[in-house]
Image (cartoon, grey):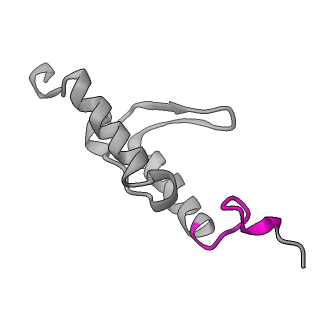
Amino acid sequence: SVDSVPDTATLLQVLRSDFEDNAYFITGRLSAEIYAPDCYFADPTVKFRGVDTWRRNLQLLVPFLQVGGGMTGNSSRHG
């Protein structure tokens, strides 16, 4: 219902916390409750619909990012 939708300030606070405090893209910790189940996500490389798909995509990326699989700066060493 419309009554359960957080106000803009609350949404911004949650998004900021997910990004800054939770590092959602690296940890997979995302406040999914602020998104509609069928919301649309898009960036320059991929687009899809749904929080479940978002979670599944994050679960696939998180292990790669946590071990320094090339996106964390560890791959720039030459040995």
Which image quarter: residue 34? Answer: top left
**Residue located at (18% from left, 26% from top):** 5
- Foreground of the two, 30 or 16: 16
The residues colored magenta run 66-76
- Foreground of the two, 17 or 29: 17
Residue 16 x/y as whole percent = 36, 39
The outermost residue toward the left is 3
Residue 27 x/y as whole percent = 45, 61
Question: In which quadrant will I find the N terminus?
Answer: top left
- In this picture, is 32 found above or below 26? above
The outermost residue toward the right is 79
The outermost residue toward the bottom is 79
- Foreground of the two, 43 or 73: 73
Residue 55 vs residue 70: left or right? left
**Residue located at (14% from left, 20% from top):** 2
**Residue located at (54% from left, 36% from top):** 48
Question: In which quadrant will I find the C terminus?
Answer: bottom right
Is 45 magenta? The answer is: no
**Residue located at (66% from left, 61% from top):** 72
Residue 47 x/y as whole percent = 59, 34
Q: What secondary structure do most residues of the magenta stretch adopt?
A: loop
Residue 57 vs residue 12: left or right? right
- In this picture, is 25 found above or below 79? above
Residue 32 x/y as whole percent = 32, 45
Image label count = 0
Residue 75 vs residue 13: left or right? right
- Foreground of the two, 60 or 30: 30
Which image quarter: residue 69? Answer: bottom right
